[in-house]
Amino acid sequence: MNTVRAPSRARIEAARVLVVGDAMLDRYWFGAVERISPEAPVPVVRIEREEERLGGAANVAFNVHALGAGATLLTVVGADEAARTLQTLLASAGVATLLGTDPKLRTVVKLRVIGRSQQLLRVDFENQPDHEVLAAMLDSHERALPAHGAVLFSDYGKGGLAHIARMIATARDQQRPVLVDPKGSDYSRYAGATVITPNRAELAQVVGAWASEAQLSDRAQNLRESLRLGAVLLTRSEEGMSLFDAEGHAHVPALAREVFDVTGAGDTVIATLAAMLACGLTLRQALPIANRAGGIVVGKFGTAGVSYEELFE
């Protein structure tokens, strides 16, 4: 694999990434667990502290900004308290926004209850939209493209990306690299993308379980060719990451470090890839950098970002 020097801070600061997808609000309730409820065999958590963080596509945009690159988030939220909180957090994080508001949509909230440094429960608040919530923002997407060096689609299967095929085609027409964090079993909607980044379970859902590395390579390459993808990047947790492209197969091993929390690690990996591509690096040059970013963020709690200093120290 080609080696590359770290992009300068000025080069990263000049790069801009457009993030499109399903934004969420992550809420954390931290408390002490001292007894079991007399009503049911469950722990009683006495809440002592609350935190709110960016989740979903919003966390991806935050990760781009944390590296030092410019990030713009294109998404639709509901007309509710969670949306207002999300907008405040995005503004505080320095993420530019192109936000649409849909009164019929409930802004996605994931509430996690933490006791003794362990997640005890997650409660999701959301509704499945009965219409395409981003349809009205197709023009905003097209107008935003010239100011951005890469486009990243963060698909969490919440109904916000029914028009992703059209958006990908528009971005490719403007010669922008397109990165997709995929969801579901039908990847045909991502046809023409520069790279998709499924994890092991997500890829197996599409191509079937593989019995060997050779079989994995064959199936990943067949998928890439059938969908006219530039590459498939498989994230493999403790096994590192594998890139399948027109040159063949490249693999980077996972970095050896303590894993504290894998929440949001995929967001960090694809955000780093997008920032590096917006800087002008190739996928093979960006791969080890993104792998290092993923290795750093799993040592942090919850959705978190990686700074330029952490990544290139």
Image (spheres, rainbow, N blue to C red):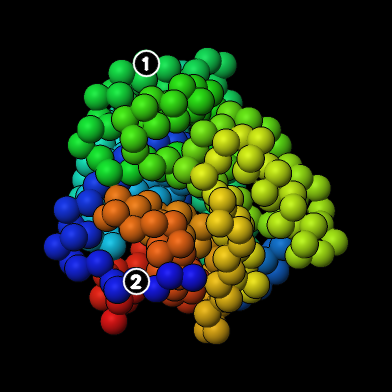
Query: What's the distance in space between the residues labelled 1 and 2, CA to CA?
Result: 41 Å
Tell me the amino acid under the disc marked 2. Answer: Val
107 vs 262: above or below: above
Locate the C terminus by quadrant. bottom left
Residue 233 at x, y percent in the picture: 56, 55
Q: Tell me: 277 left or right of 125.
A: left
Which residue is located at x 76 percent, y 45 percent? 207
- Residue 130 position, x and y percent, is 56, 16
Look at the image and tell me whether residue 259 can be seen.
Answer: yes
Neighbourhood count class around disc 1 (C-alpha, 10 Å): few under 14, some 14–19, many 20 upward: few
Quadrant housing residue 177: top left
Mark 1 is on which residue type?
Answer: Ala
Pointer 1 residue:
136
Nearest to the observer: residue 303 or residue 184: 184
Quarter of the image where one finds residue 242 = bottom right
216 lies left or right of 211? left
Label 2 neighbour load within 10 Å: few <14, some 14-19, many 20+: few
* Image position, residue 258 (x, y; %): 54, 83
The residue that disc 2 covers is 4
Q: Residue at x 82, y 53 (%)?
A: 209
Say which residue appears at 22% left-offset and 51% top-offset: 15
Percent position of residue 182, x then y: 57, 42
Camera sees residue 85: no
Residue at the front extreme, as displayed: 247
Furthest residue toward left? 10
- Which quadrant would residue 300 be assigned to in this image? bottom left
* Disc 2, SS: loop
Q: Nearer the viewer, mark 1 or mark 2?
A: 2
